[in-house]
Image (cartoon, coloured by chain):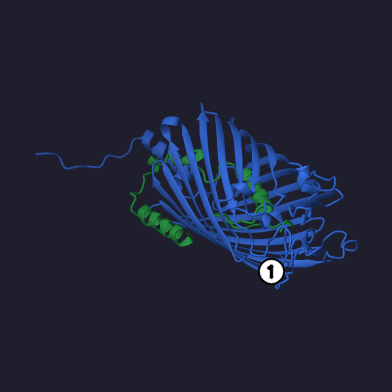
Chain colours: A blue, B green
Amino acid sequence: MSKPFKPRRPGPALTALTAAALALPAYQRAEAASRDEQAGVSVRASHYTEDALDRSQTAGDVTERFDITVGQAKGRLPVGQRFELSLDAAYETLSGASPWFIEPDENGEPVQVMSGATIDDARTDLLATVSRYGDRDTVSASVGTSREDDYLSYNLGLKWSRDTASRQTTWSLGASASDDVITPTDSDRFPLRPEEESKQSYSLVGSLSRILGKLTTWQTALSLRYLTGFLSDPYKQAFVDGTILADSRPDSRWQAALSTRLRRRVTWAQASLHADYRYFVDEWEVNSHTVKLAWHQGIGSRWELAPSLRYYSQSQAFFYRPFYLQERDDGLYSSDYRLSPYGALTYALSAHYQGEGWSLVGAVQRYDSEASLAIDSVGLANPGLVDFTLVSFGVEWRL
Amino acid sequence: MIQRLILLVLLLALTACSTTPLKPWERGHLAERSMAWEPDPLAAQLDEHVYFSKEASSGGAGTGGGGCGCN
């Protein structure tokens, strides 16, 4: 007769291993938002230069564009058993010229007119967040501000996430709002520029994160955003039947984005595959597709190299034209390349080195945009499409 | 197009519901840095801001933060 089965108590080694495993954030929940028990500080410096425009598609001598430097810092501090405080700061300086309006040349082809004088500006961005971590729930509240010489924005955010009992799935819901005021520079010299305008935005994001197995996680999210107020660009103008008019866009805009992300560990290669997709649609009839693939290759126990490729394609806003041969009934005009139809490819490579309590990261990326890269065929390409190369370097300490 | 995407996502969600819960010691690979949604949060913030300032689209899994003068 066989003995009755008695479950064995786990040995000390298994107990220690399990405790260590449970202490790791990703062991506990599907979403990487659980509290890190150590304080940490990260800093990063980045620089990018937008390529000069093609002289044959530019009116005048100015073809150079912006030169931008960004410094970022992030601090994180666990407080007590349940709370965490974090502070994000960014300081950005930019200098150069930007596309002003587009006019037709003698052949009817669009040529870009650039803003004449060099523009210098700086942006300071601060965001403070407090989070409370429960057994299965996490609640975060944030408040932030963004300031430029001609711009002031305040924003608030709330986020709640909840794990299922098995910790296999995390649901989350977030809401945010911002209130922005713009006071364009030199409005006394340029009568088409307003003296002061404002806009507000409201966002709602719901997401579902799920562990699909020992090697795979998956997340999908739906975000909705509503903007209202002054949504035009005060520094841009439009060529309308031989007359230069102010950039003028609708004063409201609904946006929706559906995104999904997959992470897959490839054990035989000591690597992880990232696959992201986003579909975006808005009230201005812009829709876009964004696909990003990244391969995070571990090299030994300390190095990681991550090449990535991002493809983006958007359609145009319903009122956009490079230039207008006649007035529109609705009075809406914009020749902004950001509302034009085009596609873009981003090639990037980043390297990460893990030290004892610190890590280094360096990255370079190249962004190329072309009308011919758009999914749909484009009649007249916008001559102001932007290309740039970005380099970045950062350090992180765990305190 | 959007309807097909929503259907695909819902099907994936239903499929995901049937997976067997993992034990803590089976989640080692998921804890790797490279398996995080954003292994480098500062780089992700910068990318989001740069793309927001140069493209017509925005939004995703994160909650929206501060704006900028780049309409």
Residue at image point 19% right, 42% down: A5
Residue at image point 80% right, 43% down: A64
Count of all numbered marks drawn on residues in the image: 1
Residue at image point 48% right, 34% down: A271
Residue A295 spot, x, y in % from top left: 51, 37
Q: Is residue B22 left or right of residue A274?
A: left
Q: Is residue A98 left or right of residue A397?
A: right
Q: Is residue A163 above or below residue A77?
A: below
Extreme-left residue of the structure: A1
Residue at image point 51% right, 50% down: A277
Subunit of label 1 = A
| Relative depth, front residue between A98 and A229 | A98
Q: Is residue A304 left or right of residue A380?
A: left
Extreme-top residue of the structure: A300
Q: Is residue A260 left or right of residue A182?
A: left
Residue A105 spot, x, y in % from top left: 78, 53
Q: Quadrant of residue A257?
A: bottom right
Residue identified by numbered label 1: A250
**Res. A66 in view:** no
Quadrant (top left/top right/bottom left/bottom right) for the N terminus of chain A: top left
Quadrant (top left/top right/bottom left/bottom right) for the C terminus of chain A: top right
Assign a secondary structure to mark 1.
loop
Amino acid identity at mark 1: Pro
| Relative depth, front residue between A123 and A66 | A66
Residue A336 spot, x, y in % from top left: 72, 57
Within 10 angstroms of label 1, few (less than 14), some, or many (20 or more) residues?
Answer: some
Residue A140 spot, x, y in % from top left: 58, 57
**Res. A120 in view:** yes
Q: Is residue A117 above or below residue B7?
A: above
